Image (cartoon, rainbow, N blue to C red):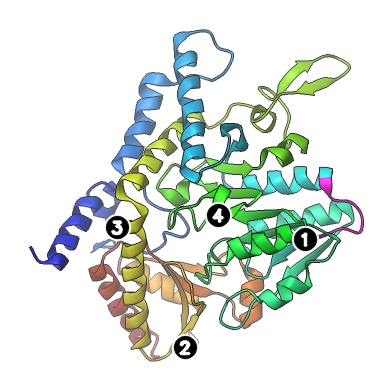
């Protein structure tokens, strides 16, 4: 069988696992190029959610009845599955949260209360998502510390010389994105971690955009914290992970208080539970954690070799096609990039482009992508962003290119 035909048949088989990809939008087949915002869910994940709420629904820990015992076991098995997926040392280094945003807020709040004082510094970068920007602004404000921001180059890469200049004895933590959600830049996080650790500085990685596109090994990276979301990796919304090294998590105070996170409560004082319970107050997203296992297994069954090769094929094809069009300006030209492309068409506002493409059934993201400092650097209001997943096709990219020509014709560019 011809290799191209075999690949096409395999992709079509994969697409059948994702019911939403069969939808029509405005009488056109859905072309979904907004995967950096959220990925779709395979039947295996949907079935896991339905099965939980239909047959297993119960709160976890402390319950002696059968449902509570069964579900507690599955919830803790989910923690172990995530530990294995990212190769953490211990399952108690895996903290379940609502998503990357809560993971970073937890880390910023708790770490700064324990380790940051007046006059200290925290380093972030100009390309951070607001979720890895604002929590550190707040933490610095509360602790009378200073937030330092590493510049990016015109090509959308970190200015590593500037980064090194920022590594002073005052720096208590570096927070950096693994992959830029607006530029597609894959940052050299291992090198950043090595240089930071040489100065005794811990590093937090925002892995929201990386977790589904390449294998993450937190021990190999030697990062001190790593944050990601289930819905970016074909899992449910409302579930996220904060990985943290045991030595830091043990010393950090709780982020929230309530049920499940205590050892003993009296009218005079409370003693907090051990990891990971100390950071998981209240009823956790039990069904979502269990369904996240199905998402991890789906990714593992496909294999990262397949995922990386497929997504590289898609983004390179799209880049080649866009470069043949006139009046297109792309933002982000990093040597190492993820399957994300940001661009503008001449002077057309990105929202206008997005609206017309939607009429053709093509879903893209428009705006500043929660990275306003990036847009300020380039002096633009925002961009049109297309982001790919392994279930996308070459034919969909061709339809998108036709759609861009339609936009230009309608708006007379």
Residue 276 appears in view: yes
Q: Which label belongs to residue 391?
A: 3
| Quarter of image, res 177 | bottom right
The spot of residue 209 in percent (x, y) is 50, 58
Q: Nearer the viewer, residue 401 or 293?
A: 293
Q: CA distance from mark 1 to mark 4?
A: 23 Å
Q: CA distance from mark 4 to mark 2?
A: 32 Å
**Label 1 vs label 4, nearer the camera:** 1
In what quadrant of the picture does the N terminus appear?
bottom left
Counting other residues with Cα less than 10 Å from the Cα at mark 1, is it few (<14), some (14-19), or many (20 or more)?
A: few
In what quadrant of the picture does the C terminus appear?
bottom left
| Quarter of image, res 7 | bottom left
Q: Is residue 226 above or below residue 198?
A: above
The first of marks 4 and 2 along the sequence is: 4
Q: Residue at x 31, y 81 (%)?
A: 406
Q: Residue at x 66, y 49 (%)?
A: 224
**Label 3 vs label 4, nearer the camera:** 4
Q: Which label belongs to residue 207?
A: 4
Q: Residue furthest front?
A: 198
Magenta highlight range? 115-121
Q: CA distance from mark 2 to mark 3?
A: 30 Å
Location of mark 1 (residue): 199
Is there a contact, CB below 8 Å, between mark 1 and mark 4?
no
| Residue 80 located left or right of residue 162 | left
Q: Residue furthest right?
A: 118
Location of mark 2 (residue): 346
Q: Which label belongs to residue 138?
A: none
The spot of residue 152 in percent (x, y) is 64, 76
The first of marks 1 and 3 along the sequence is: 1
């Amino acid at each position: 069988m011809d290799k191209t035909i075999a690949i096409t048949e395999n992709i079509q088989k994969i697409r059948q696992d994702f019911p939403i990809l069969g939808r029509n939008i405005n009488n056109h087949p859905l072309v979904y190029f907004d995967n950096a915002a959220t990925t779709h869910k395979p039947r295996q994940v949907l079935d896991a959610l339905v099965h939980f709420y239909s047959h297993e629904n119960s709160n976890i820990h402390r319950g002696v009845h059968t449902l509570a015992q069964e579900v507690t076991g599955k919830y803790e098995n989910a923690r172990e599955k995530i530990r294995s997926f990212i190769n953490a040392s211990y399952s108690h280094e895996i903290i379940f949260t609502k998503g990357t945003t809560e993971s970073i807020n937890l880390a910023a709040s708790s770490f700064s209360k324990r380790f940051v004082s007046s006059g200290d510094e925290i380093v972030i970068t100009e390309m951070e998502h607001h979720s890895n920007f604002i929590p550190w602004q707040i933490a610095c404000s509360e602790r009378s510390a200073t937030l330092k921001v590493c510049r990016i180059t015109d090509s959308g890469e970190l200015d590593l010389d500037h980064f090194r200049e920022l590594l002073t004895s005052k720096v208590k933590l570096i927070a950096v994105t693994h992959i830029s959600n607006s530029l597609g830049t894959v940052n050299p996080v291992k090198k950043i971690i090595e240089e930071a650790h040489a100065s005794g500085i811990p590093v937090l990685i925002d892995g929201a955009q990386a977790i589904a596109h390449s294998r993450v090994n937190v021990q190999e990276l030697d990062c001190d914290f790593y944050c990601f979301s289930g819905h970016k990796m074909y899992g449910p919304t409302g579930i996220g992970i904060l990985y943290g090294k045991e030595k830091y998590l043990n010393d950090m105070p709780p982020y929230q208080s309530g049920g499940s996170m205590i050892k003993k409560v009296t009218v005079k004082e409370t003693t907090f539970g051990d990891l990971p319970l100390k950071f998981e107050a209240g009823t956790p997203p039990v069904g979502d954690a269990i369904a996240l296992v199905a998402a991890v297994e789906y990714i593992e069954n496909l294999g990262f070799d397949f995922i990386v090769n497929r997504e590289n094929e898609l983004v390179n094809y799209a880049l080649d096609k866009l470069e043949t069009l006139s009046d297109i300006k792309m933002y982000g030209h990093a040597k190492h990039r993820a399957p994300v492309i940001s661009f503008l068409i001449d002077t057309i506002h990105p929202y206008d482009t997005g609206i017309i493409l939607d009429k053709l059934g093509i879903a893209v993201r428009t705006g500043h992508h929660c990275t306003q400092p990036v847009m300020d650097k380039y002096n633009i209001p925002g961009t049109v962003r297309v982001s790919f997943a392994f279930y996308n096709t070459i034919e969909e990219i061709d339809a998108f290119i036709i759609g861009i020509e339609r936009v230009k014709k309608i708006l007379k560019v």
